Image (cartoon, grey):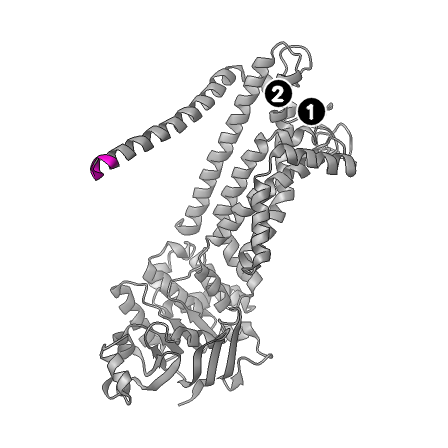
Amino acid sequence: MKEVITAKNVKLNYGNFEALHGISLNFHEKELTALIGPSGCGKSTFLRCLNRMNDDIENIRITGEILFDGKDIYSPKTDLVELRKEVGMVFQQPTPFPFSVYNNIAYGLRLAGVKDKELIDQRVEESLKQAAIWKETKDNLNRNAQAFSGGQQQRICIARALAVRPKVVLLDEPTSALDPISSSEIEETLMELKHKYTFIMVTHNLQQAGRISDQTAFLMNGNLIEAGPTEQMFIAPEKQITSDYLNGRFG
Amino acid sequence: MNAKSRDKLATIIIHILVAIVVLILAGILGNILITGVPHLSWHFLTSEASSYKAGGGVRDQLFNSLYLLVLTTIISLPIALGAAIYLSEYAKDNWITSLIRTTIEILSSLPSIVVGLFGYLLFVVQFGFGFSIISGALALTFFNLPILTSNIEQAIQGVPQAQREAGLALGLSNWKTIRGIVLPAALPGILTGLILSAGRIFGEAAALIYTAGQSGSTVDYSNWNPFSPTSFLNVMRPAETLAVHIWKVNTEGIISDATIVSAATSALLVIVVILFNLGARYLGNKLYQKLTAAK
């Protein structure tokens, strides 16, 4: 299995506080990896290292190595726009921009320098279809994206992330702000899409991780406790503490 | 006294207090409008002010007020916008930033007569602009900047942090995120702040008495050359505004209908300011709807 992102001994400090104590983890192509663990364990922080979203935080220091397609993303030569085009992101709260659905999806494309109107039209339609929101939006492409329901907004955001054809999409608790029905719709969408894209998802919902992920990584207190194929992790985890967490004895 | 009757008492007191506020406001507004509106007429709006005879109008004063408002807005909006963007997006949370914020707060409570005298010394005397529209506009900018800046800053800070992150995650630079996402999202708030401050500028007198002057020169509304001394667009000519006119008519006016003129001018001033406020709400709501739900 080809590895898309490889993290080697990633440590992260806020000032004197070390939040990640050296995490090494590989992400396989066209798989969905779930990052699980109790609140404050560093899973979101780690996720945000993968597209350098932590860069702007003051007094932050990240060491170790994160390779994307074999290249160190923290090297000074990395083009952030290019990186974030390849590694997209969807957040906990749906974050459609305050303009039309069409312009939301087209934004990233235009930013990437695509000018061809036909190509943009085609990508908008394709992305919305992939995110399973085409039916609800096709007659309303000029409607403001923020006027849709939470679940619909989140799928518009997924479509926006997909429009620039990224290799990897980071999902930071993408369904925790949504109702159960919208959540399960998003899960279905992700199940479909993971044959085409690589997903890395932070989630608090263990059942969700069990249902849709191929690989699971369990983090606690800034350490990677255990990682492996999801089935194996959920049925026979190697460590007692993993088993305790998965069985709801703490966290 | 038990909790229930205490609650009742508190409710009654609060209602009485609010009634006092409403009564005072309604009284002032009602008085101004009732005494002024009957004297408002097309003739009053379109004829020149007279210096000693009865029956003058406020044509030039009305135009000067609007012209000063437009100029002040043109000067102060970009500055306030830039300062607000800096404060909300770039400024680090340290003592320099809090010093800037405190300075802005102090400036916004500066008495306008002080702003006027400062403008007189700096623009009228030092820079040699004389009593002129440009001196007035610059003084009004000083007067307007602090409040406009904090209004815009609040509007920008009202945009959820998640929106900025989403922009950055898409590969947008800081500036592109601000320009492309944060500013459009903050637009309704910015607009409301702008129109409300326009009301303040429009009604300001003290800051203008010593800067824009109290006398109107002869104004020719068909002369479009802004460098000609008689042109209505000339920014170097002295210009009396509506608010200054009220003050002047009442203090040193020798026209026999001074009470009528000042009542009518006051009413006109109040009506325009009310229109600004209603306009601010309407436009703010419209924009908000457009940005959040409009089809």
Tell me which residue sits at (66%, 19%) in the image. Answer: B48
Q: Secondary structure at mark 2?
A: helix
Which amino acid, by three-letter code, is at mark 2?
Answer: Thr
Q: Is residue B252 visible?
A: yes
Tell me which residue sits at (41%, 74%) in the image. Answer: A170
Number of marks in picture: 2
The residue lying toward the viewer, choosing from B225 and A42, is: A42
Identify the magenta region.
Answer: B2-6
The residue lying toward the viewer, choosing from A248 and B159, is: A248
Q: Which residue is mark 1?
A: B214
Q: Which residue is mark 2?
A: B46
The residue lying toward the viewer, choosing from A136 and A156, is: A156
Q: Is residue B67 visible?
A: no
Q: Main secondary structure of the magenta part?
A: helix
Chain bearing mark 2: B
Residue A245 at what x, y percent from top left? 26, 79
Instruction: Rate crowding at label 2 as few (under 14), some (14 to 19) or many (20 or more) other CA atoms within 10 Å.
Output: some
